[in-house]
Amino acid sequence: MKSLFYEGGPLFMGILTIVLIVMVAWTIYHILPVLLNKENHLVKKASKLKHIKTIGTFGLVTGILGQLIGLSAAFDAIERAGEVAGGILAGGLKVSTISTMYGVLIFLLSLLLWFICDNILTAKTE
C-alpha cells in the first residue's frame, strides 16, 4: 500500500487521503447525533449529509487532476528523450492511473456512506 502511495505521487495521494479523512469525519460528525437520538432537526441533518457526495466528487476530480498532471509531465519527459520503449511508456501510464483509482474509490465510498446515512435518516423520520 505504501508503495502505491509513493508511486501515485505523494502530493496528490496526500491530498486524496486528507479528502478521505474529511469525508469520514464529516459523516461521523453529522450522523452520530441522529443515531444517538440527540438530533431533532432531521431535515437540517439531511441537507448537511448531502455534502458527503460533494466531498467524494472533489476526491474524484482531484484524482483525475493528479493523473492529468502526471501524464503531462511524462509526455514532456518523452518529448525530451526522443524515443521511448513501449514497456516504459506502459509502466508510466499504469502509474498515472493510481491517483485516479484512489479518487474513484473515495467517490464510491462517499456514495455508499451517503446511501447508508440517507436510509438511516429516512427510517428515523418515518
Image (cartoon, rainbow, N blue to C red):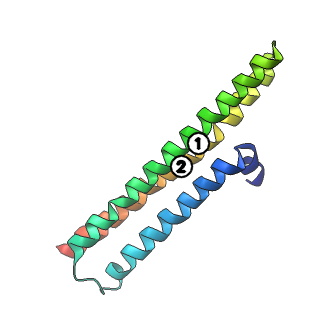
Where does the image place residue 66, in percent across and percent down from the top left?
61, 40
Residue type pointed to by label 1: Met
> Mark 1 — residue?
101
Residue type pointed to by label 2: Leu
At x 35%, y 85%, the residue is 36
Where does the image place residue 107, in percent across and percent down from the top left?
47, 50
Where does the image place residue 74, in percent across and percent down from the top left?
72, 27
Query: Outermost residue toward the top?
Result: 83
For residue 105, which numbered disc appears in the image?
Answer: 2
State whether residue 81 is above or below residue 60: above
Query: Which quarter of the image is occupied by the C terminus?
Result: bottom left
Residue 88: quadrant of the picture: top right
Q: Residues within 10 Å of mark 2 (few under 14, many from 20)?
A: some
Residue 100: quadrant of the picture: top right
Query: Outermost residue toward the left?
Result: 126
Q: Which structural element holds mark 2?
A: helix
At x 33%, y 65%, the residue is 49
Q: CA distance from mark 2 to mark 1?
A: 6 Å
* Front residue of this view, candidates 123 and 51: 51
Q: Which structural element holds mark 1?
A: helix
At x 61%, y 36%, the residue is 67
* Front residue of this view, candidates 71 and 23: 71
State whether residue 29 is above or below residue 9: below
For residue 11, which numbered disc appears in the image?
Answer: none
State whether residue 84 is above or below residue 126: above
Where does the image place residue 68, in percent across and percent down from the top left?
59, 33
Q: Are marks 2 and 1 in contact (CB under 8 Å)?
A: yes
At x 65%, y 50%, the residue is 13
